Structure formats: C-alpha cells, structure tokens
Image: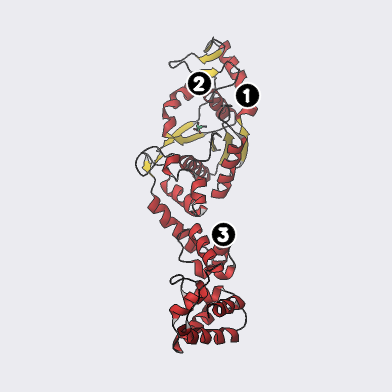
Amino acid sequence: MVKVRFAPSPTGSLQLGNALTAVANRSFADRHSGVMLLRIDDTDAARSTRESADGIMRDLEWLGIPYEEGPVCQTGRIEAHRAAAGRLLEAGRAFEDGGTVRFDAERRPTLLRSDGSPTYHLASVVDDAELGVTHVIRGKDHLANTPLHVALAEALGLEPPEFLHHGLILAEDGHKLSKRHGLSSVADLRESGVPAEAVRAYLVELGLPRGDVHLDLARLRRLSLDAISAMSDAEFSARVGAPAALGPALRGAHDLNEARELARALLEPEAVQLGAAARPTLESFRELREAANGRLGEEASRALVKAVKAAGGDLRTLRLALTGRERGPELWTVVAGLPRDDALRRVDAAL
Ligand code: GLU
C-alpha cells in the first residue's frame, strides 16, 4: 500500500511552498488509494516550537488536507534513531568524531550531535523506513539530500522509499518566497481574505511542477472569485460573519476581507443629512417599505426599488440615505439585506 508523509519542520508558519508539498502528497495518496502520515520534524530543538506545530496543523485543517496517520513527532522516536546510529557504528559504516557520530560516506554527514540528538538526515531516513513510507514527495530543495538518504537507508539494511521532487514556488519577482514578499504563508493568505478553497485549488492546479514556478497572485484572485461564486448566500455570509440576508449585497467582493468591509459599511453606515429635495423619494420609499412586512426577498426588493423609481424617486438619494455612500452594491440587495426597521430608521435620520 502506498504511504506518503508530509514532514514539516515546526520552525515557523506553513509556507506556501510547503503547503504545495502537502497537497501533492495528499493527491498522490488519493490517486493510489494510499494513506498520508503527518510527521513533525522537530529534531532541531533550538528552532522547533510547539506553537509552530500547532499552527501548521491548523493551517492543514483550514486548507482541508486530512491525514490518516500522525502527527508523529520525531523527538518521540529518538531511541530508534540512536539505535540506528549504533547499528551503523557496529557495522563500521559510521564513526565517532568529537562526540558526534558521522556517516562514513562521501559527505561524512553528522548523524548524532554531541548532545546525542539525531540530525534530520538520520531521523528522516529511519522514520521513513520504520513508519512504512513508500514514497517521499518533497521540494527540489531536498534533491541534493536524496543520494545520502538512499545510501543511509541501504547502509541500515532498510528499503529506501521512492523519491519525487517538485519545483518550488518563487515570489512573483523570481526570488525565494519569503516574509518580505507579504504573502508567503498560508496564514498570510487567510488573513488577506483568500478563501481556503481558492488556496487549495491553486495548489492542486500547480500539481507537481517540474521546474520552479512563480507565485501567480492574479490567478489566486481569480480562484478566490470562483470560490466565492460557488458558495451559497448562506455559506458566503456565514464565512464573512454577516447576517444571511446580506449575502446578495456582498457578491461584488473579490475576497472575504472585501466582503467583511462591505458588510461593515452596510451595517454601520455613515450618518447622512439630505436636504428637502430628498423628501419625496424617501417618503415614497418609506411608505412602500412600511407596507411590506418583514424581510424582503429578491423579487419583492427589486419591485420596491422599481416602484420608488416609477413614482419619480431618485435612486441615488435612496442609496445615500440607506448606505451613507454614493456607490455600492445593487440597491435591491441593500433593501433585501436590511431589516425593515433599520431601513426606516435610516431614511428618517437622513430627513
Ligand atoms: N522537515 C523537512 C522540511 O520541512 C522535510 C524534508 C523531507 O521531506 O524530507 O524541509
């Protein structure tokens, strides 16, 4: 059975490139009816934190990337790593060097640090084999490690997994994606209002790029719009934290933050004072809205706006009174989104 693993180092937040690795592993497992293991590569004690591990797991959940096994923390398997180093020493495939243990191979990489803790190379090879990982799918930044990982596995008498390396996500400017680019982590995208579906769709679309790819923010924006269009009004407004009736009024938003901002503007509009010329329009709206009980659906709201206009009303005036702004969502969506008493109160306040 195919078993893959996603093995982040908990030294910060989940970067987009790592999220690509996670999605690629998930897709591979699904395609082969296999399973995915989450392994937390926390052998670097100085840089690993619990918060980072928790954050990465939250980000995976937000993205909708489940795993069947784990999380397995490498620090919980240190005895197995030490035992492996001991076997290599015994077999003459490793040697001691100033308190450390090194692999007797071309690069002579460290396997155990002087404090007895295993390095990533040893821990990764031992865990991949002992946890039954059949395929390692990771970024090309690890390509240079692969011959070592295969040699180490063979020296231990373990069957090395198959390795697949994918291109990295670079910033739009071609540099390594980093914090200074603003949007570099899954959390950055979430906070900027991109729906999870869009991030996930973007990564699925990238698949297993052979070469490096440039982050395409325009594509991500397009996918955000698609994700929002695919949501029902109820789902959309719930994600935004707005009343369900506001759903149609928020449709013009390109992402969830824009929708939140729109909702806020509709729920807490600037107060406006309109002159005497506004009176006929607002009075006719008042009369019609008062007569209609409760919430208005799309049809009734459209009809009401039409009726105000037919009676000679000025819709710009009505919009100003209801929203405090000259521009905004289609007027019927505002009428549908506001409870009757709120609408009447706003109209009265403007007069
Ligand atoms: N913890 C390593 C990383 O995050 C995993 C590398 C690997 O997949 O072997 O880069």
Q: Position of residue 153 (x, y in %)?
A: 52, 23
Q: Is mark 3 within 8 Å of ligand 1?
A: no
Helix, strand or loop for disc 2: helix
Residue 60 figure quarter: top right
Write down the residue under mark 2.
Answer: 152
Q: Position of residue 198 (x, y in %)?
A: 47, 54
Tell me, for residue 239, which label it has, or none.
3
Of labels 3 and 1, earlier in sequence is 1
Q: Amino acid at mark 1?
A: Ile
Residue that extends furthest to the left in the rendered view of this protein = 173
Q: Amino acid at mark 2?
A: Leu
Vertical arrangement, residue 228 with respect to residue 277, above or below? above
**What's the coloring here?**
secondary structure
Residue 152 seen in this snapshot: yes
C-alpha span from label 2 to label 1: 17 Å
**Numbered disc in front, either 3 or 1:** 3
Helix, strand or loop for disc 1: helix
Residue 296 seen in this snapshot: no
Residue at the image position 52 percent from the left and 41 percent from the top: 14
Q: Amino acid at mark 3?
A: Arg
Q: Position of residue 320 (x, y in %)?
A: 47, 75
**Count of labels in the image:** 3
Tell me, for residue 78, which label it has, or none.
1
Of labels 2 and 1, earlier in sequence is 1
